[in-house]
């Protein structure tokens, strides 16, 4: 009997993993372009897609060669860490007035979208005088789900992080920034796209990319790398 393990980490498998992970950000795009509500997409597409993604990872750990399991785990951890770095960088701008540094750096409402994400997923009005705890929790959870799925998407694109320079993660992050600016995102959330906003968010996305690229590379190496058969 052959002891060979099933391999899901193939070009077709990676494309499937990328597609399933991308369902997180697609639910926002579906709302933007009037395809369906963010709430509908979240419950009927994104959550099932992420459940399938989790199932594939577990199956690969049990029956496969573990390349897919390792890649999804690396992408998840590195993506979450990159999202945290992204948000930490933005704290001084969000709380510039409270920290009395608004004379040095511009105050920017960079966190205002998170409770709005939650409200949209919960089927509530996007603009509210104040947002419930549930809207805040759901919105921030959605934000971090994007961070971790971007990490998985990055691993699915590059395949082996030990053979790809981490700068590819920065280019991906910059692409996300440009995508945000050229979608209805600013109009949907009444964001004034001035020079300060563009510069700060661009730098924040670059920090996300650096953290994702270097983090995933280090994790992959510590776990004997994520190798891909092409």
Image (spheres, rainbow, N blue to C red):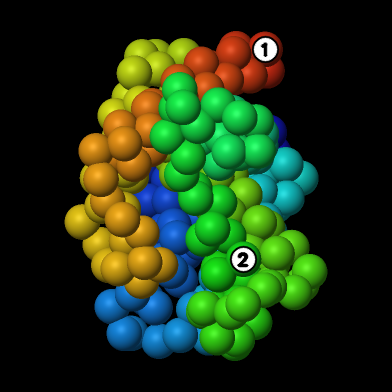
Q: Nearer the viewer, residue 40 or 199?
A: 199
Indicate the quadrant where residue 119 lies.
Answer: bottom right
Q: Is residue 137 left or right of residue 34?
A: right
Q: Residue at x 46, y 14 (%)?
A: 162
Is residue 196 visible in the rendered structure shown here? yes
Q: Nearer the viewer, residue 97 or 93?
A: 97
Q: CA distance from mark 2 to mark 1?
A: 37 Å
Q: Quadrant of the C terminus?
A: top left
Please provide percent x and percent y for residue 175.
27, 40
Q: Residue at x 40, y 67 (%)?
A: 189
Q: Which mark is residue 222?
A: 1
Crowding at label 2, few (<14), some or many (≥20) Cα neighbours within 10 Å? many
Q: Residue at x 59, y 87 (%)?
A: 123
Q: Which mark is residue 115?
A: 2
Describe the element under mark 1 as helix, strand or loop.
Answer: helix
Describe the element under mark 2 as helix, strand or loop.
Answer: helix
Please provide percent x and percent y for residue 158.
37, 30
Q: Is residue 150 left or right of residue 121?
A: left
Crowding at label 1, few (<14), some or many (≥20) Cα neighbours within 10 Å? few
């Amino acid at each position: 009997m052959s002891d060979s393990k099933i391999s899901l980490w193939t070009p077709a498998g990676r494309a499937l993993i990328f597609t399933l992970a991308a369902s997180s950000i697609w639910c926002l795009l579906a709302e933007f372009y009037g395809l369906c509500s963010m709430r509908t997409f979240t419950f009927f597409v994104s959550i099932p897609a992420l459940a399938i993604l989790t199932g594939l990872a577990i199956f690969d750990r049990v029956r496969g060669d573990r390349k897919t399991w390792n890649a999804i785990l690396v992408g998840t951890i590195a993506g979450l860490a990159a999202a945290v770095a992204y948000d930490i960088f933005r704290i001084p701008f969000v709380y510039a007035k409270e920290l009395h540094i608004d004379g040095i750096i511009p105050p920017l409402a960079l966190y205002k979208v998170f409770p709005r994400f939650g409200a949209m997923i919960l089927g509530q009005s996007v603009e509210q005088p104040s947002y419930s705890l549930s809207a805040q929790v759901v919105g921030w959870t959605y934000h971090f789900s994007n961070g971790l799925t971007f990490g998985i998407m990055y691993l699915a694109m590059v395949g082996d992080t030990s053979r790809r320079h981490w700068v590819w993660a920065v280019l991906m992050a910059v692409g996300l920034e440009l995508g945000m600016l050229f979608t209805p995102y600013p109009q949907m959330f009444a964001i004034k796209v001035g020079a300060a906003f563009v510069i700060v968010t661009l730098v924040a996305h670059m920090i996300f990319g650096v953290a994702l690229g270097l983090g995933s590379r280090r994790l992959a190496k510590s776990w004997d790398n994520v190798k891909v058969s092409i």
